[in-house]
Image (tube, rainbow, N blue to C red):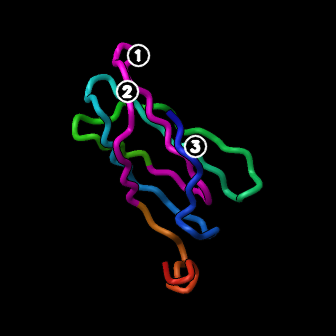
Amino acid sequence: IITDVFNMNTNKVKTIASISVNVNSTENIYGGIQFRLSPTDVFTSTPILPIGPDGTLRLPCFGNGFRVNVLGNPTIDNFKIEGIKIRGRIHDYMYLDTGGV
């Protein structure tokens, strides 16, 4: 599963420290991040790594826009993502940059 592009409502660059994924299984879950440095760039992928038993993938990544990849065990019926939490930082962020959102 690959998410839609997200940019945290700003075109400033960001660093992702980790992602936490809530899925309907904890067996053999892997993840990675696709990133780009500007809105017109092609996405580049990080390595796909195992997601820990707590659902967290610590995979630092720098960019402007991101997509999250989550791969589940192909033997699981109806594998789905129930939620994603992203921990990171927007560089040179000011409250007015996102229209107060």
| Magenta-drawn stretch, dominant element (helix, strand or loop) | strand
> What's the residue type where badge 3 is placed?
Gln
Stretch in magenta = 60-87
44 or 55, which is in the foreground?
Answer: 55
- Which image quadrant for residue 26? top left
Percent across and percent down for residue 66 are 57, 51
The residue singled out by tag 3 in the image is 34
Mark 2 vs mark 1: give the one in front. Answer: 2
Residue drawn at the location 55% of the way across and 86% of the way down? 96
Q: Is residue 76 above or below residue 63?
A: above
Q: 47 left or right of 81? A: right
In this view, the residue farthest toward the front is: 78
Measured Cα–Cα span from mark 3 to mark 1: 21 Å
Q: Residue at x 28, y 40 (%)?
A: 55
Q: Residues within 10 Å of mark 1 (few under 14, many from 20)?
A: few
Kind of residue at disc 2 = Phe
Q: Earlier in the sequence, mark 3 or mark 1?
A: 3
Indicate which label's residue lies in the foreground, 3 or 1: 1
Residue 22 in the image: x percent, y percent?
A: 30, 42
The residue where tag 2 is placed is 79
Q: Earlier along the polypeptide chain: callout 3 or callout 2?
A: 3
Q: Is residue 26 magenta?
A: no
| Residue linked to disc 1 | 74
- Badge 2 crowding class, 10 Å Cα cut-off, few under 14, some 14 to 19, many 20 or more, is some
The CA distance from mark 3 to mark 2 is 21 Å
Q: Residue furthest right?
A: 40
Residue depicted at x 44% and y 28%: 71
